[in-house]
């Protein structure tokens, strides 16, 4: 309290009052956590420090008419008493209890700065200093760095020329400061930077050294102006730029014309982003790491190279209430605020990228790796096409040519060679020498997920899409999808139709892709193909492809994206081709693939209540009945596939699984089209052709055994009907349908008769035995 009083109007005005919870005024010399300058302030304020008695606040205030008064008291027991001061308008009073009130330090600091607003003269002077600073900056590239461990991975020698803004305790690291030579230093915390602890004292000493070494200006809240005027040397006062915090503002893109920043709880959104947006057109981030979900013991992790670890215990002793917060809630609010601010900045035409990865989705989505053969460049492509390649020497050249032939030319192709043992790498290197838009990334074998993730980290385009190295891309694919995306609602991704083709490139008459907007709740099925999708880079990078998932990794990746609240909007055109290889159509591989997708469905149904990166709505997984219905559908299609592949009798284990899931759902849908698609994939013949129909009829007996095996499962009536239709047995299908309806009607009639007879005989002693048998029969009928 004495420290804050010293930051007010001087030792000749104002009073510091301690409540009578203290029997005597505390001795400062015994407080190891306090800045030694506090003792000097104490000596100046000896005559203005008093103890006041419970119940006598109003009388005490009247004795200090017109003066400023700082009260240190027990917040919980004295709040009603303090409210009595509302009628005493000629006295400016601030109460504080650092043991119980988190923002006590902020209240005290406002006391010294006209409630944090400053005076008209202070505002004018501060604005003039900032305008002078801005006029001296002749670059559009602004670097803002946080104190996360990832900052140590930044190679400053590879960075383009630009203006660096240092923040918080990174100023203690002289090696980093030498590389940055920052002309702007920013800090905003009332206890870590402007407070009375030894931690804050260490920070201020390093701040003084940095300002003198690099001629830096210091930007901070107007709230703290009195403290810095009091405790920083006078030769640095002309470098101080205090800025008011406004509770009525969000992201202020009119700064400094509108000379204030919106109130947020983190220096990145409070100062760094508004300042950077006012100074340049390209903002580069690093060192804003966030933290993993569930690691909620502190705000987030910092690099030890930037922290005053020795003083952490002391600052917690000085401000115990400040650290008694819900760190998950703080982190969640910060992540959501940051997401909104970055979107506003980019909507204003300012580019934002990060050169270090982060756990925060909004930053992870803007991460661009500066490694490998993908070098930084000032020209940002419109689209990044990520293409993994593994042993595709026969098809990769023609695939890349279809991309180069796109009507939209502003793109980069990131080819990730996934440890190929044939001529794949040689071919894509050759093509990259002819076309600078083709970037080659080499690496060991890591699988398709790892290769795609490597591409995501290096993609620099405004939009991102994917391609397979052996699948051609239709000529208008990029332009159609970009147009669809730019017409969609902000925060969406876009997808189109996918055509299935055979080994020889012949169309199989199968197209898939939903025709309406899809959200996470609709991702119970793979509704569109990965290669038909395009999205803003900051959305596509929010997630990574899951390691260790062999089948359905693309479906799971898209579903995870949409679990952030992203919507997928369709275009009607075919924008992707998917080649169905004959050697991929073996029964064993298809079975493994189908079973693997059941595991993906389990992941989509899993609740994630503690994942604060997700909207509350999507912390609940897809409903268990929807998941079970999709599992049942896929298992039935697997039975049909195996019948086409030559299995004469359905696998009993598969039949048991189908019956199990049949008992868990009330509805499941099938179509003859889906059965034809299975047949086309097995026989590699186009749908609707005489050849395919002949091949299907060649497996008639096996298909009939499938439907016979499941004839007792009522929920699969539609499935059996579609098999009849596939075989051209329309009359039998209709007869089966009529028989099912008749059986259902007779069942209801039997139900009513049994119930009526039971009720009529249950009270008749002579026929009570009959009544009991009727009851058991009734129970069996229900079963």
Image (tube, grey):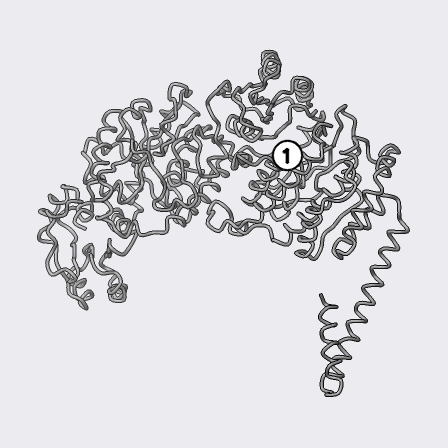
- Figure quadrant of residue 359: top left
The image position of residue 113, as x and y in percent, is 26, 46
Residue at 67 percent across and 51 percent down: it is 629
Q: Residue furthest bottom?
A: 765
Q: Quadrant of the C terminus?
A: bottom right
Of 107 and 598, which appears nearest the observer?
Answer: 598
Image position of 601 (left or right of 275): right
Horizontal relation, residue 67 to residue 428: left or right: left
634, 500: nearer the viewer: 634
Q: Position of residue 415 (x, y in %)?
A: 58, 21
Examine the rendered structure and indicate whether residue 510 appears above or below residue 54.
above
Q: Is 250 placed left or right of 548 in the picture?
A: left
Q: Could you tell me residue 447's position as x and y percent?
A: 56, 28
Q: Is residue 545 above or below residue 722?
A: above
Which residue, as the protein is rendered here, is positioned at the far right? Answer: 731
In the rendered image, residue 343, in percent from the top left (x then y), is placed at: 50, 38
The residue drawn where x is 56% and y is 23% is 418
- Reading the image, the residue beneath label 1 is 530
352 or 280: which is nearer to us?
A: 352
Q: Is residue 91 visible?
A: yes
Closer-to-camera residue (64/200): 200
Q: Secondary structure at mark 1?
A: helix
Mark 1 Cα shell of 10 Å, populated few (<14), some (14-19), many (≥20)? many
Task: Specify whether residue 347 is in view.
Answer: no
Q: Is residue 475 left or right of residue 534?
A: right
| Residue located at (83% from left, 61% from top) | 741
């Amino acid at each position: 309290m004495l420290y804050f009083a010293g930051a007010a109007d001087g030792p000749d005005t104002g009073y510091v009052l301690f409540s009578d919870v203290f029997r005597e005024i505390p001795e400062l010399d015994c407080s190891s956590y306090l800045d030694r300058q506090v003792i000097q302030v104490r000596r100046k304020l000896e005559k203005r420090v008093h103890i006041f008695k419970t119940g006598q606040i109003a009388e005490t205030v009247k004795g200090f008419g017109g003066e400023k008064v700082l009260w240190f008291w027990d917040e919980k027991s004295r709040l009603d008493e303090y409210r009595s001061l509302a009628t005493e308008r000629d006295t400016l009073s601030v109460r504080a209890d650092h043991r119980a009130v988190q923002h006590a330090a902020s209240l005290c600091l406002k006391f010294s700065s006209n409630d944090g607003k400053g005076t008209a003269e202070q505002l004018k002077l501060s604005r003039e200093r900032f305008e002078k600073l801005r006029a001296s900056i002749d670059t559009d590239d602004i670097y803002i760095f946080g104190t996360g461990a990832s900052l140590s991975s930044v190679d400053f020698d590879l960075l383009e020329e630009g203006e660096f803004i240092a923040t918080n305790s990174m100023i203690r690291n002289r090696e980093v400061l030498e590389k940055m030579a920052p002309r702007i230093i920013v800090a905003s915390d009332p206890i870590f930077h402007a407070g009375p602890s030894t931690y804050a004292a260490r920070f201020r000493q390093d701040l003084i050294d940095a300002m003198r070494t690099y001629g830096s200006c210091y930007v901070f809240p107007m709230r703290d102006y009195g403290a810095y005027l009091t405790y920083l040397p006078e030769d640095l006062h002309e470098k101080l730029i205090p800025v008011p915090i406004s509770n009525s503002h969000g992201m202020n893109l009119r700064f400094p014309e509108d000379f204030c920043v919106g109130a947020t709880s983190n220096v990145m959104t409070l100062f760094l982003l508004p300042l950077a947006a006012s100074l340049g057109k390209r903002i580069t981030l690093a060192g804003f790491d966030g933290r993993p979900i569930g690691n909620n013991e502190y705000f987030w992790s910092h690099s030890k190279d930037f922290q005053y670890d020795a003083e952490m215990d002391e600052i917690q002793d000085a401000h115990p209430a400040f650290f008694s917060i819900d760190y998950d809630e703080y982190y969640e609010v910060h992540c959501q605020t940051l997401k909104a601010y970055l979107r506003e900045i980019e909507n204003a035409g300012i580019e934002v990228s990060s050169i270090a990865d982060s756990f925060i989705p909004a930053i992870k989505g803007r991460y661009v790796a500066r490694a490998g053969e993908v070098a930084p460049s000032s020209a940002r492509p419109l689209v990044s096409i990520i293409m993994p390649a593994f042993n595709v020497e026969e098809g990769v050249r023609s695939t890349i040519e279809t991309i180069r032939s796109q009507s939209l030319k502003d793109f980069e192709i990131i080819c990730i060679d996934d440890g190929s043992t044939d001529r794949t790498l040689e071919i894509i290197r050759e093509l990259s020498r002819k076309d600078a838009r083709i970037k080659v990334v080499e690496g060991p074998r890591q699988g398709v997920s790892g290769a795609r993730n490597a591409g995501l980290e290096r993609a620099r385009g405004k939009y991102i899409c994917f391609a397979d190295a052996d699948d051609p891309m239709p000529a208008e694919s990029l332009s159609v999808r970009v147009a669809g995306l730019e017409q969609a609602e902000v925060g969406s991704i876009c997808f189109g139709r996918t055509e299935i083709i055979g080994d020889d490139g012949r169309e199989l008459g199968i197209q898939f892709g939903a025709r309406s907007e899809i959200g996470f709740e609709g991702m119970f099925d793979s509704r569109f193909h990965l290669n038909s999708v395009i999205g803003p880079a900051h959305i596509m990078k929010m997630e990574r492809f899951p390691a260790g998932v062999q089948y359905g990794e693309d479906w799971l990746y898209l579903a995870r994206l949409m679990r952030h609240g992203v919507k997928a909007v369709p275009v009607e055109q075919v924008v992707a081709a998917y080649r169905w290889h004959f050697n991929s159509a073996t029964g064993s591989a298809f079975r493994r693939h189908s079973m693997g997708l059941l595991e993906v469905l389990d992941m989509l149904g899993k609740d994630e209540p503690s994942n604060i990166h997700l909207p509350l709505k999507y912390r609940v997984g897809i409903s268990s009945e929807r998941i079970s219905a999709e599992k049942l559908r896929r298992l039935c299609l697997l039975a049909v596939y195996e019948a086409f592949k030559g299995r004469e009798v359905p696998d009993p284990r598969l039949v048991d699984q189908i019956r199990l899931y049949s008992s868990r759902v009330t509805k499941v849908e099938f179509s003859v089209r889906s059965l034809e698609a299975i047949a086309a994939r097995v026989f590699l013949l186009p749908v609707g052709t005489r050849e395919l129909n002949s091949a299907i009829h060649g497996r008639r007996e096996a298909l009939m055994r499938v439907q016979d095996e499941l004839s007792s499962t009522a929920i699969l009536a539609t499935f059996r009907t579609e098999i009849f239709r596939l075989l051209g047995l329309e009359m039998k299908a209709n007869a089966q349908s009529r028989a099912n309806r008749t059986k259902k009607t007779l069942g209801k009639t039997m139900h009513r008769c049994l119930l009526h007879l039971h009720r009529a005989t249950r009270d008749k002693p002579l026929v009570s035995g009959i009544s009991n048998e009727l009851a058991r029969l009734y129970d069996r009928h229900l079963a």
